[in-house]
Amino acid sequence: MVPLRLLMILLALAVFDLHSLPWFVNVSESKGPGTVLQAFTFNCSFYMPTLELLSVQPPTTFFNTPSLARHGGIYVGKVILSSSARLDALAVNHYVLQLKYKCGNFVMEAPLFLDVQRDPGNIQCVGRFVSPAGEIIQVPETVSPGALLYTLLFPGLEVQGAQMNITSAQDPPYFPGPFSINEKGLLRAPSQGLRGQAQKVFQMQISVTFGQGRSCKGILTVKVLPVPSSQVSFQKKTQNIIIPENLVPGSEVIQVQATGLDLRYEICSPVPSPLYSIGRVDGVIRTTAPLELAGASGATPTRLRVKAFERLQQWASAELDLTVNVRPVNRWPPLCHPALLVTEVPEATPVGTALSTFTCNDPDSADTNLHYQLQFHSPSNSASLRLYDRVLEVNTTLDCDIPEACFQLAASVLVHDSGQPQMTTEVPVLVMVTPVNEFSPACAPRTFRVREDAQPYTLLGSVVGTDMDYPQSSIEYYISGGLTVFAVDHLSGEIRLLGPLDYEQQKLYRLTVLLIDHGQDWDSTHHRSGSCTITIEVEDVNDHAPECEPPFQELTISSPLGHNVEVTKMSCQILQEPQRLALSYSIVGGNSQSRFRLQGAILVHNDSVLGPPWPQQPCTYELLIRVADAGPSTSHLSTTATIIVHLLPWKASTMATRTHRAIVPSMMTPLLVTDTEVFWHPEPWFVVVLTVTSALLLLALGWLLSKLLQGLAQVLQAPRKPGQALLLKSIQRKERSVEGFMETPRIEMPQAPSSVLSLVCQLILLWRGHRGCSSVTPWP
């Protein structure tokens, strides 16, 4: 706080200019109320200044509060006498006014010394002497003949050479003899004395004439008192005291006390007293002016004769000889150059480097021994600086690489003199330690792992840089080499992924991260750099779906009752990653009644004796097989293969099936169109049965022909209904598709041989007493 206050004072002195502030002002005692004693000019550009009167010594109400007015760009302050001002050089001839000036944060206090000068032309008759009742004095009848009874004093009479005369008649019957008064105002008793004049009153009219015909008259009454019954005395007839010379006017010197009744005190020598006054009632002697001593002349003694007397019997008195010795006082602190030290040094400054040499002297005495002491303020226990024979030096290494280690050292040099009292001067010291970039940043090599399917902006890790310079976090990070797959945050050191990764193309990346420090040197362009290697390993993740060859299969099997038959073995692989051999297979659709299962890649028909009855009619199964990679990844890619299985009853008619695929544009749903041709190859036993039933067959054909003609007539009447029925059937088949795969719609060919064959098949089954395939799709 001390350095900041000093900087504020320096700034205030640079901004605010104080002009014509006097230290001593002489004023005549003839000046009356409203007199401007002194005017001051101030320059305060940005604030509203104030000028205050803090104190007056000795205390009085003769001075108004200073006024302050602005004239142009300058403020003018004035010290003015108040309406109660009555200056009297004989009473108080020196005043000290303590003024306080304030402009913004700048505050200055200074004393104004006012000396009251005697005015020879300001002589006038004042006091009780010129009042209607006049001045009354009391003297004892034992007073010596011709003794001094009274002194008539007017300011300046001794300068003007005034003349005084007793103008009233002094008749011998009433007066023991004439009283006399000279030009100095000294009234003396008659030459015959006043014995026997007790209780008498002598009234005299006195005329005072001074310069250029001016005069005044007054009445002086002398009362003669009998011999006093009490006696006034001091305990000691002489007394010596020592006082310091720095006492301000009005300070108490000593209080004298005498024994007696209703006493009053006065200084009877020297008259008038230029330096001291005494309280008439309390006997307190005070200073009336500064006690200035000349150089090294030592104490200057002043001899005072103090008189104590009774108020009603002034002739009852006693005197005291008082010697006042003034002791020199050490009043001025040492003056030093420089008065303020503000400097800056780099933290790499060697120990023992001199920062400044202080030169001080004592205004009170040129040969005074001065003592120097270094005191720290912030930090309070710092040992970074030392004072050796008035030279301020660097004591230890100025290390600024610890938080709040130095940067600013606030101290002061205390200079003491050997006077009494001891005076001290404080020289503020502010040393700014500037940082130096001494060390290069560094970081440790690190290895990060990332999956090859990681998304852009994925955080891989952070590069942690260290720097022994303070602040240790002032590091920026850059990737050297211009890679675009990865990026590093310049401030935090976080490494993120920017583009896609491919394990098959590149499995390992090595990045060189460049570290550059900043803000660690007084020179902002001075940087240091370092680097480290960051290794990034790419984890393999399957990013291609398996492919099966062929993707569609259509097979016809006939399985004996109670046996398992291998239907087919699927051939699937990942072409882009042939090293991946682990695949998983599962049936995800079309396996009604669970007649099929997978053993790895082999599709097996399961005909358990415990299962449902064996169908006696050919059935078709459209199986959807999901093939997925079985690697370590948490997410797997898969494809679906379609296998159409035509299941024939055991020992049933043998039928040949021809399958072809129709490829449609990619924007349309692929359709599998099956065209089946059936030929008849009966068994021998069937020929006998056919002969027996031929007659019945002819009758059935006739009946069937009549039904067909009736149906054809209905079709001709409503030709759009079969098309609508066919469209509705197609939509229903699409809705029954499994996991996004559509069942291949079969287009039935309305051929007469097929219908006849179907009728014959029904007759045979009725003859054998078996039921048809009710749970599967009939084979057309």
Image: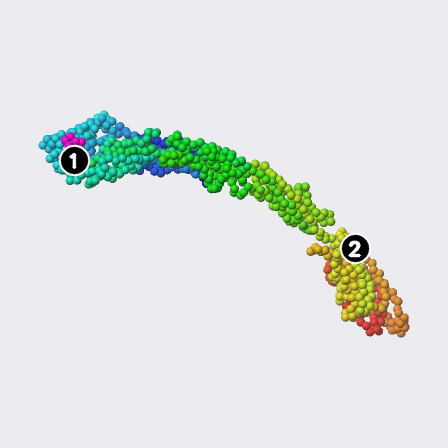
Q: Nearer the viewer, residue 140 or 570?
A: 140
- State the separation of the CA atoms marked 2 and 1: 157 Å
At mark 2, the secondary structure is: loop
Residue at 26% over, 32% down: 303
Q: Is residue 9 visible?
A: no
Q: Is residue 198 visible?
A: yes
Q: Nearer the viewer, residue 541 or 750?
A: 541
Q: Are marks 2 and 1 in contact (CB under 8 Å)?
A: no
Where, by quadrant of the figure, is residue 674 drawn? bottom right
The amino acid pointed to by label 1 is Val
Q: Which mark is residue 139?
A: 1
Residue at 19% over, 41% down: 261
Q: How is the image coloured?
A: rainbow
Left or right, 213 with respect to 566, comes to left
Where, by quadrant of the figure, is residue 778 drawn? bottom right
Query: Which region shows up in magenta?
Result: 134-148
Q: Nearer the viewer, residue 644 or 315?
A: 315
Per the image, is 745 magenta?
no
State the image coordinates of residue 638 (x, y, percent, origin top left). 73, 56
Where, by quadrant of the figure, is residue 57 drawn? top left
Q: Nearer the viewer, residue 594 or 343?
A: 343
At mark 1, the secondary structure is: strand
Q: Which residue is mark 2?
A: 664
Residue at 23% over, 28% down: 157
